[in-house]
C-alpha cells in the first residue's frame, strides 16, 4: 500500500535528535547560522533522493520544498529555492525570484533556465511545468468525458473558456452550485468575446436561440432541459458536490438533481462532451454514473503553496493535556509548542494581515463573533469611501444594521441570510478597500469565491476534510502571489490559524481537525445514482427506490407520468407524497381544472392543491419549512410579503415587519429556521420538537437593534423560501396545467411585459428594477444579436451619474 512517503517521515520523527533540531530551526529560530541552513538543506536533499527512487512518495518532495522555501526566506538566500523550482518545474516561483532580484549574480545555468521558463510564460503569468502540460493535454483531448482536478486557484475558470474556444459548440452549459457563482462566472464570460447568448436563468432561453452559453445552477438547468435545450457541451464546476447525499432529504438533494441534469443531457445528446472540474476530488471514477462510463482524468498534484499551520488552544498527547500556541508540522504529524496560551483576540491582533478571513460555520456564530471582534479591535481612521458606505448602508438597509458599526473597525461579516445584492456589494469592498481587513464568514465563500484573503482564522466548522482543504485553498490565490504588485515571496506560506473558543463549539475536537491535514482525503460517495456509491444497510431500500424512480423519470422524459411531473417540477422533493396520496392528488388536480375559479390567488391554490386534507405521516412527509404553507396565517403572510417585495424598498420592509411584530402578543414567535432559532415550538404535527427554529419576541421587545437585524435576516429567509419552496410548488402548478406561464410571471415578477421580464430574469434586484422603471430607463436596455443585454448611450450616461450600490449593480449587468 502506497503511503506517499509517510513511513520515511515517521522514521525521521522518531529520531528525536534530528526531528527536534529540524522543528526548532523551522519553527522557532528566526536567525539561522550557516550550519543551521546546511543542516536543513541536507535533510531536504535526503528527502529528494528518496523521492527520486519512487515518485509515488510525493510527500517527501513536498516536505523538501517546504524546508528549502522556509530556509531561503529566513536566510534571504534564494539560490537553493531557485535551483529546486527550476529542476521540478515550479517555474512561477523561479520567475518571481528573478523579478524580485533575489539572486546575487547571473550564472550560465540561470540564463538557460530563463530560456526554459520563457516557454511557460506569457505577458501576464507563468505556468508550472505540470500545469502547462496538463492544460495542453486536456485542450487537445476530444474525449466525451474528461475531468480536471487541481488545487484551488490553478486556473479552472481560465481552462473552461479556453476549452470552449478550442472546441466550438453551439449550446454550452456551465453548471455552478450557487447563484453567487452565476454572477462571478457570467461576468468573466462577458469578457471572453464568445459570440454567444449568455443565459443565467431558465426563462432567458428561447428555442430560437442558436448559439448559447448557459451559466446556471442544476435547478435552472433542469428547467432548461424541460424547455427543450440540447447541450453540446457541459462543464460541471465544483463536481465533488455530486458525491454528497442525505437520505433524510430524499429527492431534495441537490446532488441528485445534478446527476439528473447530466443523465438527461446525455439522453438528449449521446455525443455530448462533459468536463468535471474540482479542487478536492480524489478519484474521477467516483463521478461515473454507470459502469459503461470512463472519465479521462487530468490532475495537477504539485501545489506551490505551503501551509503554515498553528493551533491556539489545547492538545492531548499520551493522555497528557497541554495548552499553548502550537505549530503543526503536517509532514511529521507533530505539534511543536512555540508559545504560551494567550487571549484569542490579542493573538489575532498580533498576527493579523491585510485581509483576514475568520471562519465559523453557523450564521448566528458569525454575528456573535463579529460583535466580539468589534469589541476587541481598535478604531480605524475611515476613508471617504468607507464613510460613504456606512451612510449608504444606514439609508439602504437600516441605521441599526450591525454592519454599519462593524465597518468602522474594518470588519464585514457574510452569511447566506443577508440580502444577496448587499452581500455582493460588500464583497466589492472586501476586494478593493485596504481598510476592510477582517471578513467573518462561513461556507458562502467556499464554492469558487475569489477574494484576496491572506490569512485564515479557523474558529469553528465541520470535520469534513474536503471542505477544510477547499477553505484553505481560498488563502493567497496564485494570481495574488505572482502578481506584479506583490513583492513578498513569503506569500507562498499560507497562514492557517486554528483558535479554540469555548463560546463557539466545534463539530469535533480542534486538534483532530488539524491532524487530519496530514491525511489524503478519501471520496465519500453517498449519491445512490453514482456507480461507486457506498450505501449503508439501513438506506439500501431507499436507495433502490430512488434509483428506480430516477431511471423511470429519465426514460419517460417528454411524456412524464403524474408522479414524475411532481418530481421533475419540484413538489415531490419537498413534500414527499406516498404512493396512495399521489393518486389522491392526481384525482384532485383533474377535478380542480374543471371546477376552480380562475381568479383564485396562486398561494391559496398552493394550499388547496398540495396541503388540504392530507395527513402528515400517512399521506406525505413534507419538510418542516414547506409544511408551514398548510396554515392560512402563513399563506396570508406570504401574500403580503410578495406584494411588499414588488413595491417597497428594503428599509421600508424592515420597518414594516418590526412594526407588525411590536403589535403582537408576548407569546408570538417568529420562524427563522435553525440558523438563528432560539426556541423550539411544539405543534400538533411536531410534538416534543427539539429543533430551535423560532425566536420568542417577548425576549427582545425592548431591543430595537436586535429586532431590526432580525428583520433583515427574516426577510432574506422569506425571500429564499419564496425563491425555492414556493417557487417549486408554483412551478408544479404550471407543469400540471393548473396555471400558465403568464400567471407564474405575474405572481413571481409582478409583470407580464416581455421587456420587463427580460430585465428581471437577468437577476437584477427588485429595488434596482423599480428604480430603472421609475427613471424610464427600461427602454434604454438593448439586446445584441445574440440576445445579451447592453446599455445604449443614454443608459451609459445614466450609469455614470449613479453612485454606490446602484452604480455597482448597473455596472455588473450592463457595463
Image: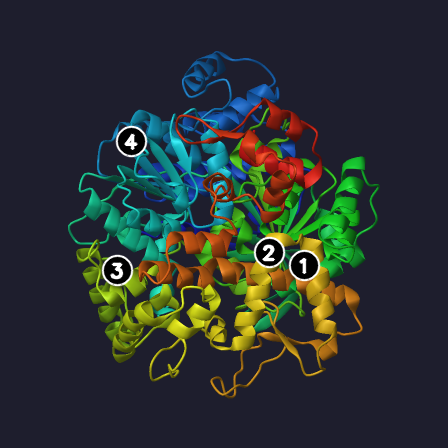
**Within 10 Å of the Cα at label 1, are there few (<14), some (14-19), or many (20+) other Cα atoms?**
some
Name the one closer to the observer, 298 or 40: 298
Q: Along the polypeptide, which appears first: circle 2 or circle 4?
A: 4
Quadrant housing the C terminus: top right
Residue at horizontal 63 percent and vertical 37 percent from the top? 808
| Residue under label 3 | 529
Counting the numbered discs, the total is: 4
In front here: 530 or 106? 530
Residue 35 locus on image (x, y percent): 60, 35
- Distance from Cα at disc 1 to Cα at disc 3: 43 Å
Q: Residue at x 52, y 76 (%)?
A: 632
What residue did someone put label 1 on? Answer: 653
Q: Position of residue 690 (x, y in %)?
A: 54, 82
- Judging by the rendered image, the residue that carries numbered circle 2 is 645
Q: Earlier in the sequence, mark 4 or mark 1?
A: 4
- Whether residue 566 sits left or right of residue 339 in the image: it is left
Q: Callout 2: few (<14), some (14-19), or many (20+) C-alpha neighbours within 10 Å?
A: some
Q: Secondary structure at mark 2?
A: helix
State which mark lies toward you, 1 or 3: 1
**Distance of mark 2 from mark 4, alpha carbons?**
37 Å
Of badges 2 and 4, nearer the viewer stands: 2
Q: N-terminal of the two: label 4 or label 3?
A: 4
Amino acid at each position: 500500500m502506497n503511503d506517499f512517503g509517510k513511513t520515511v517521515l515517521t522514521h525521521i520523527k522518531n529520531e528525536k535528535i534530528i526531528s527536534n533540531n529540524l522543528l526548532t530551526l523551522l519553527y522557532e529560530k528566526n536567525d539561522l547560522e550557516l550550519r543551521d541552513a546546511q543542516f536543513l538543506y541536507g535533510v531536504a536533499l535526503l528527502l529528494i533522493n528518496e523521492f527520486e527512487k519512487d515518485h509515488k512518495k510525493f510527500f517527501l518532495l513536498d516536505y523538501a520544498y517546504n524546508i528549502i522555501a522556509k530556509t531561503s526566506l529566513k536566510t534571504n538566500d534564494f539560490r537553493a529555492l531557485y535551483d529546486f523550482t527550476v529542476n521540478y518545474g515550479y517555474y512561477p516561483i523561479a520567475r518571481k525570484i528573478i523579478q524580485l532580484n533575489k539572486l546575487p549574480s547571473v550564472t550560465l545555468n540561470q540564463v538557460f533556465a530563463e530560456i526554459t521558463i520563457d516557454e511557460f510564460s506569457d505577458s501576464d503569468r507563468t505556468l508550472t511545468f505540470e500545469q502547462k502540460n496538463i492544460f495542453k493535454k486536456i485542450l487537445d483531448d476530444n474525449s466525451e468525458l474528461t475531468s480536471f482536478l487541481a488545487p484551488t486557484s490553478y486556473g479552472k475558470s481560465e481552462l473552461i473558456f479556453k476549452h470552449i474556444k478550442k472546441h466550438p459548440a453551439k449550446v454550452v452549459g456551465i453548471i455552478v452550485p450557487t447563484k453567487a457563482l452565476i454572477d462571478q462566472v457570467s461576468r468573466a464570460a462577458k469578457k471572453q468575446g464568445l459570440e454567444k447568448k449568455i443565459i443565467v436563468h431558465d426563462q432567458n432561453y428561447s428555442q430560437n436561440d442558436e448559439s448559447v452559453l448557459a451559466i446556471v445552477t442544476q435547478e435552472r438547468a433542469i428547467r432548461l432541459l424541460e424547455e427543450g435545450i440540447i447541450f453540446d457541451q457541459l462543464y460541471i464546476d465544483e463536481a465533488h458536490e455530486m458525491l454528497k447525499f442525505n437520505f433524510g432529504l430524499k429527492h431534495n438533494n441537490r446532488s441528485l438533481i445534478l446527476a439528473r441534469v447530466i443523465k438527461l443531457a446525455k439522453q438528449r445528446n449521446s455525443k455530448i462532451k462533459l468536463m468535471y472540474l474540482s479542487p478536492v476530488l480524489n478519484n474521477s471514477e467516483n463521478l461515473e454514473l454507470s459502469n459503461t462510463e470512463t472519465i479521462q482524468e487530468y490532475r495537477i498534484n504539485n501545489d506551490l503553496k505551503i501551509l503554515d499551520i498553528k493551533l491556539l488552544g489545547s492538545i492531548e498527547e499520551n493522555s497528557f493535556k497541554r495548552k499553548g500556541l502550537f505549530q503543526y508540522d503536517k509532514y511529521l504529524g507533530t505539534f511543536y509548542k512555540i508559545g504560551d496560551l494567550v487571549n484569542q483576540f490579542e493573538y489575532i491582533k498580533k498576527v493579523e494581515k491585510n485581509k483576514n478571513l475568520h471562519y465559523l460555520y453557523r450564521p448566528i456564530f458569525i454575528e456573535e463573533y463579529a460583535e466580539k471582534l468589534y469589541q476587541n479591535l481598535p478604531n480605524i481612521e475611515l476613508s471617504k469611501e468607507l464613510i460613504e458606505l456606512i451612510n449608504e448602508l444606514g439609508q439602504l438597509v437600516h441605521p441599526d444594521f450591525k454592519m454599519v458599526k462593524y465597518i468602522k473597525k474594518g470588519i464585514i461579516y457574510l452569511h447566506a441570510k443577508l440580502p444577496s445584492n448587499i452581500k455582493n456589494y460588500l464583497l466589492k469592498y472586501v476586494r478593493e478597500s485596504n481598510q476592510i481587513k477582517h471578513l467573518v464568514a462561513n461556507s458562502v465563500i467556499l464554492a469558487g469565491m475569489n477574494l484576496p484573503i491572506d490569512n485564515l482564522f479557523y474558529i469553528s466548522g465541520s470535520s469534513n476534510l474536503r471542505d477544510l482543504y477547499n477553505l484553505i485553498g481560498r488563502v493567497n490565490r496564485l494570481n495574488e502571489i505572482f502578481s506584479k504588485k506583490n513583492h513578498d515571496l513569503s506569500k507562498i506560506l499560507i497562514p492557517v490559524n486554528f483558535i479554540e473558543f469555548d463560546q463557539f463549539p466545534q463539530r469535533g475536537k480542534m486538534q483532530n481537525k488539524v491532524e487530519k491535514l496530514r491525511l489524503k482525503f478519501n471520496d465519500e460517495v453517498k449519491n445512490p445514482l453514482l456507480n461507486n456509491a457506498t450505501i449503508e444497510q439501513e438506506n439500501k431500500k431507499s436507495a433502490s427506490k430512488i434509483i428506480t424512480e430516477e431511471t423511470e423519470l429519465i426514460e419517460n422524459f417528454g411524456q412524464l407520468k403524474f408522479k414524475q411531473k411532481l418530481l421533475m417540477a419540484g413538489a415531490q422533493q419537498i413534500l414527499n407524497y406516498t404512493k396512495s396520496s399521489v393518486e389522491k392528488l392526481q384525482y384532485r388536480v383533474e377535478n380542480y381544472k374543471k371546477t376552480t375559479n380562475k381568479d383564485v390567488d396562486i398561494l391559496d391554490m398552493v394550499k388547496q392543491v398540495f396541503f388540504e386534507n392530507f395527513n402528515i405521516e400517512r399521506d406525505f412527509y413534507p419538510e418542516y419549512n414547506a409544511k408551514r404553507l398548510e396554515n392560512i396565517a402563513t399563506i396570508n403572510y406570504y401574500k403580503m410579503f410578495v406584494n411588499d417585495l414588488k413595491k417597497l424598498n428594503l428599509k421600508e420592509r424592515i420597518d414594516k415587519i418590526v412594526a407588525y411584530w411590536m403589535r403582537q402578543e408576548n407569546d408570538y414567535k417568529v420562524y427563522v429556521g435553525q440558523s438563528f432559532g432560539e426556541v423550539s415550538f411544539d405543534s400538533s404535527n411536531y410534538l416534543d420538537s427539539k429543533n430551535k427554529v423560532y425566536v420568542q419576541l417577548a425576549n427582545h421587545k425592548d431591543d430595537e437593534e436586535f429586532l431590526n437585524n432580525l428583520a433583515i435576516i427574516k426577510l432574506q429567509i422569506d425571500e429564499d423560501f419564496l425563491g425555492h419552496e414556493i417557487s417549486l410548488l408554483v412551478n408544479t402548478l404550471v407543469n400540471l396545467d393548473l396555471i400558465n406561464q403568464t400567471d407564474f410571471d405575474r405572481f413571481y415578477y409582478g409583470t407580464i411585459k416581455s421587456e420587463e421580464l427580460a430585465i428581471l430574469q437577468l437577476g437584477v434586484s427588485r429595488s434596482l428594477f423599480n428604480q430603472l422603471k421609475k427613471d424610464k430607463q427600461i427602454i434604454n436596455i438593448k439586446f445584441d444579436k445574440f440576445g445579451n443585454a447592453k446599455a445604449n448611450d443614454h443608459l451609459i450616461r445614466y450609469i455614470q451619474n449613479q453612485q454606490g450600490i446602484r452604480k455597482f449593480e448597473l455596472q455588473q449587468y450592463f457595463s
